[in-house]
Amino acid sequence: MIKFDFKSYVMPFINQEEYKTLYGMKQQVIEKFNSYDMIGWTKTINKEWIDDISKTAKEIKKNFDCMVVIGIGGSFLGSYSFEKMFQKYFDDKNFEVIYAGTTLSSKYLDELSSYLYRKNFCMNVISKSGTTMETTITYKVLKDILKRKYTGEEIKKRIIITTDKEKGALREEANEQQYKSFEIPDDIGGRYSFLTPAHLLPLALNYDIYRIVDGYYDGKRLIDVAYEYAVIRRLLFKEGRVVENFCVYEQNLSPFTEWLKQLFGETEGKNNVGIYPTSSVHTRDLHSLGQFVQEGNKILFETFIKIKNMDNFIDYNGQNLQDINNIVLDSVMKAHFKGNVPCLEIELSELDLETISSLIYFFLLAAAFSGILFEVNPFNQPGVEVYKEEVRKSLNK
Ligand code: PA5
Protein backbone atom coordinates (compact mmCIF):
# COMPACT_ATOMS: atom_id res chain seq x y z
CA MET A 1 0.00 0.00 0.00
CA ILE A 2 1.16 3.55 -0.72
CA LYS A 3 0.05 6.62 1.22
CA PHE A 4 0.66 10.19 0.11
CA ASP A 5 0.75 13.36 2.16
CA PHE A 6 1.12 16.41 -0.07
CA LYS A 7 -0.65 18.74 2.35
CA SER A 8 0.62 18.76 5.96
CA TYR A 9 3.95 20.44 5.22
CA VAL A 10 3.11 22.06 1.88
CA MET A 11 -0.13 24.04 1.91
CA PRO A 12 1.20 27.28 3.48
CA PHE A 13 3.62 27.58 0.56
CA ILE A 14 1.09 27.57 -2.26
CA ASN A 15 -1.76 29.82 -3.28
CA GLN A 16 -5.05 27.98 -2.58
CA GLU A 17 -6.96 29.64 -5.41
CA GLU A 18 -4.26 28.67 -7.90
CA TYR A 19 -4.31 25.14 -6.51
CA LYS A 20 -8.07 24.87 -7.10
CA THR A 21 -7.76 26.28 -10.63
CA LEU A 22 -4.91 23.99 -11.65
CA TYR A 23 -6.45 20.96 -9.98
CA GLY A 24 -9.67 21.74 -11.85
CA MET A 25 -7.78 21.38 -15.14
CA LYS A 26 -7.28 17.65 -14.58
CA GLN A 27 -9.57 16.47 -17.37
CA GLN A 28 -7.96 18.85 -19.87
CA VAL A 29 -4.47 17.65 -18.94
CA ILE A 30 -5.52 13.99 -19.18
CA GLU A 31 -6.97 14.66 -22.64
CA LYS A 32 -3.72 16.29 -23.74
CA PHE A 33 -1.80 13.32 -22.28
CA ASN A 34 -3.98 10.88 -24.25
CA SER A 35 -3.29 12.80 -27.45
CA TYR A 36 0.44 11.91 -27.41
CA ASP A 37 1.57 8.92 -29.43
CA MET A 38 4.29 7.98 -26.87
CA ILE A 39 2.06 6.53 -24.17
CA GLY A 40 2.50 2.87 -25.10
CA TRP A 41 3.69 2.32 -21.51
CA THR A 42 0.09 2.73 -20.28
CA LYS A 43 -1.11 -0.13 -22.49
CA THR A 44 -1.18 -3.82 -21.60
CA ILE A 45 2.10 -5.56 -22.32
CA ASN A 46 2.09 -8.50 -24.70
CA LYS A 47 1.73 -11.67 -22.58
CA GLU A 48 3.83 -13.68 -25.06
CA TRP A 49 6.75 -11.32 -24.44
CA ILE A 50 6.60 -11.91 -20.70
CA ASP A 51 6.59 -15.67 -21.20
CA ASP A 52 9.48 -15.44 -23.68
CA ILE A 53 11.47 -13.21 -21.32
CA SER A 54 10.87 -15.62 -18.44
CA LYS A 55 11.93 -18.60 -20.52
CA THR A 56 15.04 -16.81 -21.80
CA ALA A 57 16.03 -15.85 -18.24
CA LYS A 58 15.76 -19.50 -17.14
CA GLU A 59 18.04 -20.56 -20.03
CA ILE A 60 20.57 -17.85 -19.14
CA LYS A 61 20.69 -18.97 -15.51
CA LYS A 62 21.12 -22.60 -16.57
CA ASN A 63 23.95 -21.91 -19.01
CA PHE A 64 25.96 -18.96 -17.68
CA ASP A 65 27.42 -17.55 -14.45
CA CYS A 66 26.57 -13.94 -15.13
CA MET A 67 24.96 -11.53 -17.59
CA VAL A 68 26.36 -8.15 -18.58
CA VAL A 69 23.70 -5.54 -19.30
CA ILE A 70 25.01 -2.94 -21.74
CA GLY A 71 22.88 0.21 -21.88
CA ILE A 72 22.61 3.76 -20.62
CA GLY A 73 19.92 6.28 -19.59
CA GLY A 74 16.45 4.90 -20.09
CA SER A 75 17.95 1.64 -21.34
CA PHE A 76 19.62 1.02 -17.97
CA LEU A 77 18.27 2.98 -15.00
CA GLY A 78 14.95 1.14 -14.61
CA SER A 79 16.28 -2.38 -14.14
CA TYR A 80 19.47 -1.19 -12.43
CA SER A 81 17.66 0.80 -9.75
CA PHE A 82 15.07 -1.92 -9.20
CA GLU A 83 17.78 -4.60 -8.92
CA LYS A 84 19.78 -2.56 -6.39
CA MET A 85 16.73 -1.81 -4.28
CA PHE A 86 16.05 -5.47 -3.64
CA GLN A 87 19.63 -6.67 -3.34
CA LYS A 88 21.00 -7.72 0.01
CA TYR A 89 23.72 -5.39 1.30
CA PHE A 90 26.03 -8.31 2.04
CA ASP A 91 26.27 -11.92 0.87
CA ASP A 92 23.87 -11.29 -1.95
CA LYS A 93 23.02 -14.65 -3.55
CA ASN A 94 21.34 -13.25 -6.66
CA PHE A 95 22.41 -14.35 -10.12
CA GLU A 96 25.21 -11.95 -11.06
CA VAL A 97 24.08 -9.07 -13.29
CA ILE A 98 26.75 -6.51 -14.24
CA TYR A 99 25.59 -3.15 -15.53
CA ALA A 100 28.08 -1.75 -18.05
CA GLY A 101 27.76 0.83 -20.81
CA THR A 102 27.47 3.94 -18.66
CA THR A 103 31.06 5.10 -18.83
CA LEU A 104 33.95 5.65 -21.23
CA SER A 105 36.46 4.97 -18.46
CA SER A 106 39.27 2.84 -19.92
CA LYS A 107 40.18 1.73 -16.38
CA TYR A 108 36.66 0.39 -15.83
CA LEU A 109 36.40 -1.36 -19.19
CA ASP A 110 39.88 -2.84 -18.95
CA GLU A 111 39.21 -4.22 -15.47
CA LEU A 112 35.76 -5.46 -16.50
CA SER A 113 37.30 -7.21 -19.53
CA SER A 114 39.86 -9.02 -17.34
CA TYR A 115 37.12 -10.05 -14.91
CA LEU A 116 34.84 -11.31 -17.67
CA TYR A 117 37.61 -13.21 -19.42
CA ARG A 118 37.60 -15.57 -16.43
CA LYS A 119 33.79 -15.88 -16.35
CA ASN A 120 31.20 -17.87 -18.24
CA PHE A 121 29.15 -14.83 -19.28
CA CYS A 122 26.50 -13.68 -21.73
CA MET A 123 25.42 -10.15 -22.55
CA ASN A 124 22.24 -8.22 -23.20
CA VAL A 125 22.85 -5.13 -25.34
CA ILE A 126 20.01 -2.63 -24.89
CA SER A 127 19.55 0.46 -27.05
CA LYS A 128 16.39 1.73 -28.68
CA SER A 129 18.26 3.80 -31.25
CA GLY A 130 21.06 1.27 -31.64
CA THR A 131 23.53 4.12 -32.06
CA THR A 132 24.36 5.30 -28.52
CA MET A 133 28.10 5.91 -28.19
CA GLU A 134 28.73 4.41 -24.73
CA THR A 135 26.66 1.32 -25.55
CA THR A 136 28.35 0.82 -28.92
CA ILE A 137 31.87 1.12 -27.50
CA THR A 138 31.20 -1.17 -24.52
CA TYR A 139 29.54 -3.74 -26.77
CA LYS A 140 32.52 -3.79 -29.14
CA VAL A 141 35.05 -4.16 -26.31
CA LEU A 142 33.12 -6.99 -24.64
CA LYS A 143 32.35 -8.75 -27.92
CA ASP A 144 36.11 -8.86 -28.51
CA ILE A 145 36.42 -10.75 -25.22
CA LEU A 146 33.84 -13.26 -26.42
CA LYS A 147 35.74 -13.62 -29.72
CA ARG A 148 38.99 -14.31 -27.85
CA LYS A 149 37.30 -17.11 -25.93
CA TYR A 150 34.77 -18.63 -28.34
CA THR A 151 33.76 -19.06 -31.97
CA GLY A 152 30.57 -19.33 -34.09
CA GLU A 153 27.52 -20.75 -32.32
CA GLU A 154 29.09 -20.32 -28.89
CA ILE A 155 29.32 -16.53 -29.44
CA LYS A 156 25.84 -16.42 -30.93
CA LYS A 157 24.14 -17.92 -27.89
CA ARG A 158 25.84 -15.39 -25.59
CA ILE A 159 24.49 -12.23 -27.24
CA ILE A 160 20.94 -10.97 -26.75
CA ILE A 161 19.88 -7.70 -28.34
CA THR A 162 17.02 -5.47 -27.18
CA THR A 163 16.29 -2.67 -29.63
CA ASP A 164 13.82 -1.15 -32.08
CA LYS A 165 11.61 -3.58 -34.02
CA GLU A 166 12.95 -2.53 -37.42
CA LYS A 167 15.47 0.30 -37.35
CA GLY A 168 19.09 0.80 -36.28
CA ALA A 169 22.47 -0.92 -36.39
CA LEU A 170 21.64 -3.34 -33.57
CA ARG A 171 18.45 -4.54 -35.26
CA GLU A 172 20.39 -5.10 -38.48
CA GLU A 173 23.06 -7.05 -36.63
CA ALA A 174 20.50 -9.13 -34.72
CA ASN A 175 18.79 -10.04 -37.99
CA GLU A 176 22.00 -10.77 -39.87
CA GLN A 177 23.62 -12.83 -37.11
CA GLN A 178 20.33 -14.32 -35.94
CA TYR A 179 20.94 -13.29 -32.36
CA LYS A 180 18.12 -13.71 -29.89
CA SER A 181 16.40 -10.34 -29.73
CA PHE A 182 13.60 -8.39 -28.05
CA GLU A 183 11.71 -5.26 -29.12
CA ILE A 184 11.33 -1.86 -27.52
CA PRO A 185 7.99 -0.63 -28.90
CA ASP A 186 7.85 2.49 -31.10
CA ASP A 187 5.43 4.26 -28.79
CA ILE A 188 7.61 4.00 -25.65
CA GLY A 189 10.61 6.29 -25.05
CA GLY A 190 13.70 5.38 -23.00
CA ARG A 191 12.81 6.76 -19.56
CA TYR A 192 9.23 5.46 -19.86
CA SER A 193 10.34 1.95 -20.86
CA PHE A 194 10.37 0.21 -17.45
CA LEU A 195 7.71 -2.31 -18.47
CA THR A 196 9.42 -3.46 -21.67
CA PRO A 197 11.97 -6.20 -22.39
CA ALA A 198 14.69 -3.53 -21.90
CA HIS A 199 14.22 -3.88 -18.14
CA LEU A 200 12.19 -7.03 -17.72
CA LEU A 201 14.85 -9.41 -19.08
CA PRO A 202 17.59 -8.29 -16.64
CA LEU A 203 15.02 -8.33 -13.82
CA ALA A 204 13.68 -11.77 -14.74
CA LEU A 205 17.03 -13.27 -13.76
CA ASN A 206 16.33 -12.62 -10.08
CA TYR A 207 12.72 -11.51 -9.69
CA ASP A 208 9.21 -12.69 -10.50
CA ILE A 209 8.34 -10.41 -13.40
CA TYR A 210 4.68 -11.51 -13.35
CA ARG A 211 4.43 -9.84 -9.91
CA ILE A 212 6.22 -6.76 -11.26
CA VAL A 213 3.74 -6.51 -14.14
CA ASP A 214 0.74 -6.86 -11.78
CA GLY A 215 2.10 -4.19 -9.42
CA TYR A 216 2.82 -1.82 -12.30
CA TYR A 217 -0.72 -1.99 -13.66
CA ASP A 218 -2.12 -1.68 -10.15
CA GLY A 219 -0.43 1.76 -10.15
CA LYS A 220 -3.09 2.91 -12.64
CA ARG A 221 -5.45 3.55 -9.73
CA LEU A 222 -3.07 6.31 -8.58
CA ILE A 223 -3.91 8.61 -11.51
CA ASP A 224 -5.63 11.29 -9.39
CA VAL A 225 -2.89 11.48 -6.80
CA ALA A 226 -0.26 11.55 -9.59
CA TYR A 227 -2.03 14.58 -11.00
CA GLU A 228 -2.19 16.19 -7.55
CA TYR A 229 1.57 15.68 -7.13
CA ALA A 230 2.18 17.31 -10.54
CA VAL A 231 -0.01 20.28 -9.58
CA ILE A 232 1.72 20.83 -6.24
CA ARG A 233 5.17 20.67 -7.88
CA ARG A 234 4.10 23.14 -10.55
CA LEU A 235 2.82 25.60 -7.95
CA LEU A 236 5.93 25.25 -5.79
CA PHE A 237 8.02 26.03 -8.89
CA LYS A 238 5.95 29.18 -9.35
CA GLU A 239 6.91 30.18 -5.81
CA GLY A 240 10.61 29.89 -6.66
CA ARG A 241 11.12 26.27 -5.53
CA VAL A 242 13.13 25.21 -8.55
CA VAL A 243 14.87 22.18 -7.00
CA GLU A 244 13.22 18.97 -5.77
CA ASN A 245 15.27 16.93 -3.32
CA PHE A 246 14.19 13.27 -3.20
CA CYS A 247 15.08 12.01 0.30
CA VAL A 248 15.47 8.30 1.04
CA TYR A 249 16.26 6.57 4.31
CA GLU A 250 17.56 3.31 2.83
CA GLN A 251 20.87 3.41 0.94
CA ASN A 252 19.62 0.81 -1.54
CA LEU A 253 17.05 3.32 -2.73
CA SER A 254 19.75 5.73 -3.86
CA PRO A 255 19.87 4.30 -7.44
CA PHE A 256 16.07 4.71 -7.57
CA THR A 257 16.58 8.45 -7.07
CA GLU A 258 18.90 8.33 -10.12
CA TRP A 259 15.97 6.90 -12.09
CA LEU A 260 13.77 9.73 -10.75
CA LYS A 261 16.37 12.32 -11.77
CA GLN A 262 16.36 11.10 -15.36
CA LEU A 263 12.58 10.82 -15.46
CA PHE A 264 11.86 14.34 -14.24
CA GLY A 265 14.99 16.00 -15.62
CA GLU A 266 14.48 14.83 -19.21
CA THR A 267 10.72 15.23 -19.07
CA GLU A 268 10.48 18.80 -17.78
CA GLY A 269 13.81 20.47 -18.46
CA LYS A 270 13.00 22.27 -21.72
CA ASN A 271 12.22 25.80 -22.94
CA ASN A 272 14.05 27.22 -19.90
CA VAL A 273 11.61 25.72 -17.37
CA GLY A 274 11.47 22.64 -15.15
CA ILE A 275 12.36 21.57 -11.63
CA TYR A 276 15.94 20.38 -11.12
CA PRO A 277 15.76 16.94 -9.47
CA THR A 278 18.37 16.01 -6.91
CA SER A 279 18.57 13.53 -4.03
CA SER A 280 19.81 12.88 -0.52
CA VAL A 281 20.40 9.65 1.35
CA HIS A 282 19.55 10.13 5.02
CA THR A 283 20.66 10.15 7.65
CA ARG A 284 24.10 10.43 5.97
CA ASP A 285 23.43 13.67 4.07
CA LEU A 286 21.84 15.38 7.06
CA HIS A 287 25.43 15.72 8.22
CA SER A 288 26.48 17.46 4.99
CA LEU A 289 23.65 18.97 2.91
CA GLY A 290 21.31 19.23 5.90
CA GLN A 291 22.67 22.63 6.88
CA PHE A 292 21.91 24.09 3.43
CA VAL A 293 18.39 22.68 3.41
CA GLN A 294 17.61 23.98 6.89
CA GLU A 295 19.02 27.48 6.63
CA GLY A 296 20.29 28.09 3.11
CA ASN A 297 18.81 29.60 -0.05
CA LYS A 298 15.09 28.72 -0.27
CA ILE A 299 15.15 27.21 -3.75
CA LEU A 300 14.22 23.71 -2.60
CA PHE A 301 11.31 21.53 -1.75
CA GLU A 302 11.65 17.91 -0.67
CA THR A 303 9.89 14.63 -1.38
CA PHE A 304 10.48 12.01 1.30
CA ILE A 305 10.13 8.32 0.49
CA LYS A 306 9.36 6.40 3.66
CA ILE A 307 9.24 2.64 4.14
CA LYS A 308 6.95 1.86 7.07
CA ASN A 309 7.87 -1.76 7.74
CA MET A 310 11.04 -3.72 7.07
CA ASP A 311 11.42 -7.48 7.44
CA ASN A 312 14.68 -6.96 9.33
CA PHE A 313 14.44 -6.35 13.07
CA ILE A 314 17.17 -4.63 15.07
CA ASP A 315 16.40 -3.91 18.69
CA TYR A 316 17.78 -0.68 20.10
CA ASN A 317 16.82 -0.11 23.73
CA GLY A 318 13.53 -1.95 23.22
CA GLN A 319 12.64 -0.15 20.00
CA ASN A 320 12.79 -1.43 16.44
CA LEU A 321 15.53 0.46 14.55
CA GLN A 322 13.28 0.88 11.48
CA ASP A 323 10.80 2.74 13.68
CA ILE A 324 13.62 4.96 14.92
CA ASN A 325 14.70 5.58 11.29
CA ASN A 326 11.13 6.69 10.55
CA ILE A 327 10.91 8.84 13.68
CA VAL A 328 14.02 10.62 12.39
CA LEU A 329 12.34 11.04 8.97
CA ASP A 330 9.22 12.57 10.58
CA SER A 331 11.36 14.87 12.73
CA VAL A 332 13.44 16.01 9.75
CA MET A 333 10.28 16.88 7.82
CA LYS A 334 9.07 18.95 10.78
CA ALA A 335 12.43 20.68 11.14
CA HIS A 336 12.78 21.48 7.44
CA PHE A 337 9.18 22.74 7.32
CA LYS A 338 10.00 25.05 10.24
CA GLY A 339 13.01 26.16 8.19
CA ASN A 340 10.59 27.19 5.38
CA VAL A 341 11.10 24.16 3.18
CA PRO A 342 7.96 22.48 1.77
CA CYS A 343 8.02 18.71 2.41
CA LEU A 344 5.96 16.05 0.63
CA GLU A 345 5.72 12.45 1.84
CA ILE A 346 5.23 9.15 0.06
CA GLU A 347 4.88 6.23 2.47
CA LEU A 348 5.25 2.63 1.31
CA SER A 349 3.81 0.03 3.66
CA GLU A 350 6.74 -2.23 2.74
CA LEU A 351 9.48 -2.67 0.17
CA ASP A 352 8.09 -5.36 -2.13
CA LEU A 353 7.95 -5.97 -5.88
CA GLU A 354 4.32 -4.94 -6.33
CA THR A 355 4.52 -1.75 -4.26
CA ILE A 356 7.63 -0.47 -6.04
CA SER A 357 6.20 -1.32 -9.46
CA SER A 358 3.03 0.65 -8.60
CA LEU A 359 5.20 3.53 -7.40
CA ILE A 360 7.06 3.49 -10.72
CA TYR A 361 3.79 3.81 -12.63
CA PHE A 362 2.74 6.64 -10.31
CA PHE A 363 5.96 8.57 -11.01
CA LEU A 364 5.73 7.98 -14.78
CA LEU A 365 2.21 9.42 -14.83
CA ALA A 366 3.16 12.33 -12.54
CA ALA A 367 6.18 13.23 -14.69
CA ALA A 368 4.12 13.21 -17.89
CA PHE A 369 1.37 15.35 -16.30
CA SER A 370 4.00 17.67 -14.95
CA GLY A 371 5.55 18.12 -18.41
CA ILE A 372 2.11 19.08 -19.71
CA LEU A 373 1.62 21.59 -16.87
CA PHE A 374 5.00 23.10 -17.82
CA GLU A 375 3.74 23.28 -21.42
CA VAL A 376 6.57 21.16 -22.79
CA ASN A 377 6.48 17.87 -24.67
CA PRO A 378 6.99 15.31 -21.84
CA PHE A 379 8.26 12.61 -24.19
CA ASN A 380 11.19 14.11 -26.08
CA GLN A 381 14.71 15.09 -25.00
CA PRO A 382 16.14 17.28 -27.81
CA GLY A 383 18.76 18.80 -25.51
CA VAL A 384 20.54 15.47 -25.08
CA GLU A 385 21.52 15.58 -28.76
CA VAL A 386 23.51 18.81 -28.49
CA TYR A 387 26.55 17.40 -26.71
CA LYS A 388 26.45 14.31 -28.91
CA GLU A 389 26.79 16.51 -32.00
CA GLU A 390 29.81 18.27 -30.45
CA VAL A 391 31.39 14.89 -29.70
CA ARG A 392 30.82 13.71 -33.26
CA LYS A 393 32.41 16.88 -34.66
CA SER A 394 35.44 16.57 -32.37
CA LEU A 395 35.97 12.87 -33.06
CA ASN A 396 35.78 13.41 -36.83
CA LYS A 397 38.34 16.23 -36.88
O1 PA5 B 1 15.21 8.68 -22.09
C1 PA5 B 1 15.86 8.56 -23.13
O2 PA5 B 1 15.30 8.45 -24.23
C2 PA5 B 1 17.39 8.51 -23.11
O3 PA5 B 1 17.90 8.64 -21.84
C3 PA5 B 1 17.86 7.19 -23.71
O4 PA5 B 1 17.25 6.13 -23.00
C4 PA5 B 1 19.35 7.03 -23.67
O5 PA5 B 1 19.97 8.11 -24.32
C5 PA5 B 1 19.78 5.73 -24.34
O6 PA5 B 1 19.26 5.67 -25.62
P1 PA5 B 1 19.22 4.33 -26.46
O7 PA5 B 1 18.26 3.39 -25.80
O8 PA5 B 1 18.76 4.73 -27.81
O9 PA5 B 1 20.62 3.78 -26.45
Image (cartoon, rainbow, N blue to C red):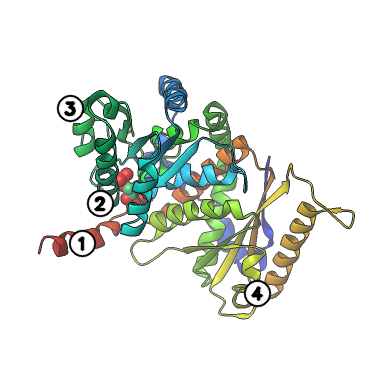
The residue mark sitting in front, 4 or 1, is 1
Q: CA distance from mark 1 to mark 2?
A: 10 Å
Q: Mark 2 and 4 residues: CB-CB less than 8 Å, in contact?
A: no
- State the mark number for residue 340: 4
Q: CA distance from mark 2 to mark 4?
A: 43 Å
**Mark 4 residue type:** Asn
Q: CA distance from mark 3 to mark 1?
A: 29 Å
Which x, y percent locates residue 91? Answer: 62, 43
Which x, y percent locates residue 276? Answer: 46, 65
Where the C terminus falls, by quadrant?
bottom left
- Classify 10 Å Cα crowding around label 1: few (below 14), some (14-19), many (20 and above): few
> Which callout, 4 or 1, points at the residue further toward the start of the chain?
4
**Mark 3 residue type:** Glu
Q: Mark 1 and 2 residues: CB-CB less than 8 Å, in contact?
A: yes
Q: Mark 4 and 1 residues: CB-CB less than 8 Å, in contact?
A: no
Q: Would you name the residue on which mark 1 appears? A: 391
Q: Is residue 85 above or below residue 58?
A: below
Secondary structure at badge 4 equals loop
The residue mark sitting in front, 3 or 1, is 3
> Which callout, 1 or 2, points at the residue further toward the start of the chain?
2
At horizontal 26% and vertical 40% (from top left) the residue drawn is 143
